[in-house]
Image (cartoon, helix red, strand yellow):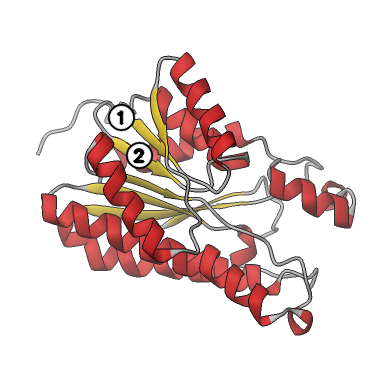
Amino acid sequence: MTFPLPNLSNDLTGRVALVTGASSGLGWRFAKVLAKQGAKVAVSGRRLERLEALVAEIRADGGEAAAFPVDVADADAMIAMVGKIQDHFGVVDILINNAGIPDAQRAHKMSLELIDKVMDVNLRGPFVLSCEVARRLIEAKMPGRMVNIASVAAFEYRGGGAALYSITKAGVIRMTEALAVEWARFHINVNAIAPGAFASEMMDGMLSRMGDITKGFPRQRLGDPAQMDSTLVYLVSPASEFVTGTFIKIDDGQGGR
């Protein structure tokens, strides 16, 4: 095998990407970035009107995108969605498991309904979706890239009322490591990004509950989603062909070391 010098291609032309949780925040940005690099992007989320607005932005910028609304807690609907995307664009070979919800409640006060919802959206859904995308890639004998959006909360919890969120994000990290091994022989690379506190719709809710949390950060600032662009593109591009089963923290030193 030969590589260009330097081996830094970010060209995603001809690739088909699926981004969950794309109706706002990080997912919105991820979808636009992947489209800008040439991928055909399937955007997924629960709010169709928001997805359609995102598709319109991508198309206005010269990209190719389509909306596929789904609740990631509905496994059957997700599996069916992957088939619809394949019929529309071709086999999904880039998956961004971005959808997630907070618990925002003390563990002993959580209802069973909320426990199930957080587990389904943050962990079970990404696992089911990853397996369906992998199954189709394996059938097509195609390589693929998966990036799971975890959190620095996977590595520490300070007792602020998000214990189950922390647990599910730790599960996402372990899922990344295990599935990377499972699918390595099929050339499906599975990696994760663990963001710190970034400006997003979810973060807006946290700030409304807790006030300005940035005062305790080394640089006293939130991240801008644009500051994840280079890492995201690297993990789905030809340049990361030898990288699988790892995670990259992007937290501006917020979590300490």
Q: Secondary structure at mark 2?
A: strand
Q: Which residue is mark 1?
A: 12
Q: Give the CA separation, mark 1 to mark 2.
A: 9 Å
How far across and how far down the image is residue 36, in percent? 42, 23
On screen, residue 207 versus residue 252, left or right, reads right
Q: Amino acid at mark 2?
A: Ala
- Is residue 89 at all visible to an observer of this figure? yes
Of the numbered discs 1 and 2, the one sitting upstream in the chain is 1
Give the numbered dot on residue 33.
Answer: none
Q: Quadrant of the C terminus?
A: bottom right
Q: Which residue is mark 2?
A: 17
Q: Quadrant of the N terminus?
A: top left
Q: Amino acid at mark 1?
A: Leu
How far across and how far down the image is residue 26, in percent? 58, 41
- Nearer the observer: mark 1 or 2; the answer is 2
- Which is nearer the eye, 167 or 249? 167
Quadrant of residue 232 in the image?
A: top left
Q: Are marks 1 and 2 in contact (CB under 8 Å)?
A: yes
Q: Secondary structure at mark 1?
A: loop
